[in-house]
């Protein structure tokens, strides 16, 4: 029988291939978040996030009030668990999305840059920076991405931001904290150093002028250009001191062009590299399904007192068909086989969707998550 269910692409479960491994490496951090959610879901620990709420949240988010009303109002009892889980997810994801951007740029530099050094860890980037400035004590600050080409005597330091329309003066000035320390504390570097600030999503172009101005105010005592010349960083690299340059790129097209110019090769694939990688890493299901189902299951447990995870486990055990991990296709086929046997047994009205097709797909996704959790 032909499978009429939509294809699912769980990277954690898929067969080995060079492309899949590259995508998994780029998405390593959000994949880790997906795994954490699935583990909490199947170990029934989603509600434990409430214990992580600090005292401020208790009054500022109304959680204490909801707890006081929880004994006779189900919605009030649900609210602290809902708030805690979604706060955990978004706080964690916010930190992880930057790791994805960093890894994408690192992969491009490794693939096309012909660089001798593209350090993976910040401590190694700082050691490399120390070598360039001939110091044993480089500033102990974060560098998002770094590449060095000793043969051509040039080094690239990249500071990445997902957007530029968030954060105040301190956030804008922080973009050049490392550069300010370098300009203030060290002699001329051995290599030409390009300090490239990349804003991935240029959502609010009005912020550009404000950001550039804040950076100039932070650096002006240590550079040899006036403000008008400094403002050119959004168009061309600007020489701040001997062998030290600054440039700012807004949006993926400008970022790609800046990388292409710094690499200095004639391989124009660099200009398409970002969009190519974005297309590759856009086609996966691990995180969104884990997050969506965990959110709904928290609601189901709170409002009905039942757990679809427990129901699934009992029915799966009763059927006695095991997951086949021999290949991703074999696993998918085994899940569909199990689903066919489970649906007639599922008499409880606990699936939080209306259409019959949606209910079946929901159980199927639960089975994928269970296979994910139990994978040897």
Image (spheres, rainbow, N blue to C red):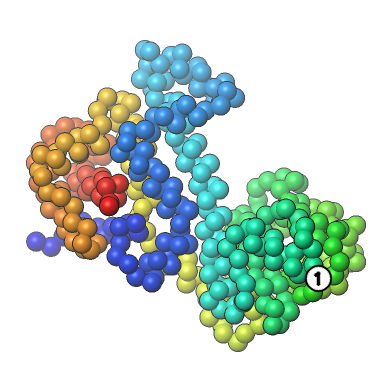
- 211 left or right, relative to 278: right
**Above/below status of 81 relative to 282:** above
Which of the two residues, 205 or 72, is positioned nearer the viewer here? 72
Determine the image quadrant of residue 314: top left
**Above/below status of 139 relative to 193:** above
Mark 1 sits on what residue? 189
Q: Residue at 76% of width from left, 51% of height from top? A: 173
Judge the density around disc 1: few (<14), some (14-19), many (≥20) Cα neighbours within 10 Å: many
Q: Position of residue 194 (x, y in %)?
A: 74, 70
Residue 204 visible, this orientation: no
Which of the two residues, 176 or 198, is positioned nearer the viewer here? 176
Determine the image quadrant of residue 2: bottom left
Residue 241 visible, this orientation: yes
Tag 1's secondary structure? loop
- 149 left or right, relative to 332: right
**Above/below status of 76 relative to 210:** above
Which of the two residues, 235 or 205, is positioned nearer the viewer here? 235
Q: Position of residue 187 (x, y in %)?
A: 86, 66
Q: Residue at 88% of width from left, 60% of height from top? A: 222
Q: How many marks?
A: 1
Q: Position of residue 208 (x, y in %)?
A: 72, 58
> On the rendered image, what quadrant is the N terminus found in?
bottom left
């Amino acid at each position: 029988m032909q499978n009429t269910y939509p294809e699912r692409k769980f990277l954690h479960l898929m067969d080995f291939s060079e492309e899949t491994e590259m995508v998994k490496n780029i998405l390593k951090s959000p994949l880790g978040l997906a795994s954490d959610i699935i583990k909490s879901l199947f170990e029934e620990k989603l509600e434990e996030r409430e214990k992580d709420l600090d005292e401020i949240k208790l009054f500022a988010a109304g959680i204490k009030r909801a707890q006081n009303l929880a004994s006779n109002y189900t919605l009030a009892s649900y609210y602290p668990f809902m708030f805690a889980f979604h706060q955990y997810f978004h706080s964690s994801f916010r930190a992880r999305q930057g790791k994805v951007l960093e890894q994408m740029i690192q992969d491009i530099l490794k693939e096309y840059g012909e660089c001798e050094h593209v350090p993976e860890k910040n401590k190694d980037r700082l050691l490399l920076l120390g070598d360039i400035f001939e110091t044993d004590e480089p500033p102990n600050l974060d560098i998002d991405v770094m590449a060095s080409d000793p043969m051509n005597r040039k080094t690239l330091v990249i500071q990445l931001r997902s957007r530029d329309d968030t954060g105040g003066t301190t956030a804008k000035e922080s973009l050049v904290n490392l550069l300010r320390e370098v300009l203030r504390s060290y002699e001329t570097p051995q290599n030409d150093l390009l300090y490239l600030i990349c804003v991935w999503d240029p959502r609010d172009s009005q912020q550009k002028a404000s950001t550039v101005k804040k950076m100039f105010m932070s650096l002006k005592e240590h550079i040899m250009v006036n403000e008008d010349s400094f403002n050119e960083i959004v168009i061309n690299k600007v020489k701040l001191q001997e062998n030290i340059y600054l440039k700012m790129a807004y949006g993926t097209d400008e970022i790609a062009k800046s990388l292409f110019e710094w690499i200095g090769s004639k391989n124009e694939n660099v200009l398409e590299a970002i969009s190519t990688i974005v297309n590759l890493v856009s086609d996966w299901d691990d995180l969104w399904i884990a997050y969506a189902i965990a959110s709904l299951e928290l609601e189901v447990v709170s409002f009905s007192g039942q757990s679809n995870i427990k129901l699934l486990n009992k029915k799966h055990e009763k059927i006695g068909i095991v997951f086949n991990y021999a290949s991703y296709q074999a696993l998918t086929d085994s899940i569909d086989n199990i689903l066919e046997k489970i649906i007639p047994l599922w008499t409880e009205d606990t699936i939080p969707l209306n259409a019959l097709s949606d209910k079946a797909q929901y159980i199927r996704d639960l089975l994928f998550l269970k296979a994910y959790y139990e994978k040897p």
